[in-house]
Image (cartoon, rainbow, N blue to C red):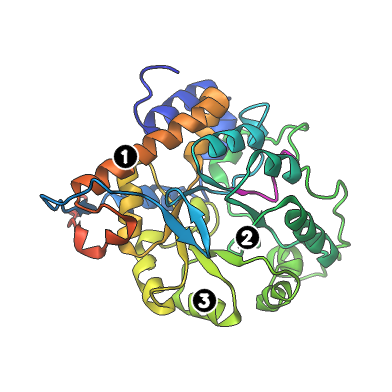
Amino acid sequence: MDPVVTCLADFEALARGALPPATYAHIAGGSADGQTVDANTAALKQFRIVSRILVDCRDGSTRVSLMGEAFAHPMLLAPLSYQRLVHPEGEIATAQAADALDTGMIVSTLASQPLEAVAGVLPRNKWFQLYLQARWDDTISLVRRAESAGYTALVVTVDAPVTGMRNQAERAGFRQPADVVAVNLPATRDVGQIALEPGQSRVFQGAMLHAPTWEAIRRLLGETDLPIVLKGVLSAADARAARDLGVSGLVVSNHGGRALAPSPTAVEVLPEIRQAVGEDFPLLADGGVRRGSDVFVYLALGADAVLIGRPQLYALAVNGALGVARMLRLVRDELELTMALAGCPSVSDIGIDRLRHREVEPSS
């Protein structure tokens, strides 16, 4: 491992030099002008962490429980698609790192390795991210495969019924390589979309023709005993509706800035969503995490755990499984150091009282 890798930003710098420019633009970019991607990291920087002195942290621990499942620390690898874009082993290498560092992993529907093969590397803390398919039978096939492979929760992404405007990737000329495909989906996914009539919208009557609704979530709840977590919630009203419908948890997320732009950050809406669903309802969050102190901020604002997204691809591109393991070790060490200096020997000690919001001068 290159000795200059001392933090997650180093991985991104090295990955930018190692990857084809178009591939890097595809990974790093967001929707439209990328303002939401930038806002995710900027929002976390608006907080300062208050230290508390003379606290006995000798029995400190990062252990947490999520929906009855024990985790060594409150960080999970977010579901990222097509990981063979950056490394030949793709999700298999990422799973090896997750296992070595006791980290939960959420495997994408659009993984470039079979979901069963990835599950085989992970003895515990493996969740499956589900995109609801246009054909219900295809959705249920994925659910049954996830159940059989030993996944312990379904994370249903609900904030991207259509793809956002990926201008940065388009300008860079990104094209999906022919040998990097969503191997878990049927090779032919023609759902018989009807031709548009004059005056009809390519979005509303076209791309949204098979988009899921609340009824699909209700139906899914009746199809499986696995806990269902909805990913991509930014509204307190939607959070309450999901809780009342019977889902087991939520991920407060703007899809890494890759869906609606501009949209609020998870940092902005997390406190009001926590208030809306109550203290005991499982909430995860993501967006902009580059330091263990960022994880601390999310936990202080009301999250039970935090997802790490792009950094896993940067680390995977730099050094495969060893790179992802190094990335996870760095951010976990940073979280523990932050907790110790803030006087929080356990995750349950992390609260809003440890944060101060920094007023930012308006730019000229």
Q: Is residue 195 above or below residue 22?
A: below
For the stretch drawn in magenta, the main secondary structure is loop
72 to 87, vertically: above or below: below
Q: Earlier in the sequence, mark 2 or mark 3?
A: 2
Residue 252 visible, this orientation? no
Three-letter amino acid code of the residue under disc 1: Glu
What secondary structure is marked by label 2? loop
Distance of mark 2 from mark 1, alpha carbons?
Answer: 28 Å
Residue visible at 55% across and 82% down in the picture: 244
Which amino acid does the dot numbered 3 rest on?
Answer: Asp
Mark 3 lies on a secondary structure that is helix
Q: Are marks 2 and 1 in contact (CB under 8 Å)?
A: no
User: Which residue position is annotated with label 1?
Assistant: 334
Nearer to the camera, 143 or 172: 143
Q: Answer above or below: position of 32 versus 122.
A: below
Q: Per the image, is 108 magenta?
A: yes
Task: Name the kind of residue labelled 2 in the image.
Answer: Ala
Q: In the figure, is residue 84 to the left or right of 331?
A: right
10 Å crowding of disc 3: few (<14), some (14-19), many (20+): few
Report the residue that reaches farthest toward the top.
2
Relative to the observer, which residue lies in front, 69 or 206?
Answer: 69
Tell me the magenta residue range.
106-113
Q: Is residue 51 above or below residue 168?
A: below
Residue 172: x and y, percent?
A: 58, 33
Front-most of residues 108 and 266: 108
Q: Which residue is mark 2?
A: 153
* Nearest to N terminus: mark 2 or mark 1: 2
Q: What residue would you read off at disc 3? A: 238
| Residue 68 in sight here | yes
How many discs mark residues in the rendered view? 3
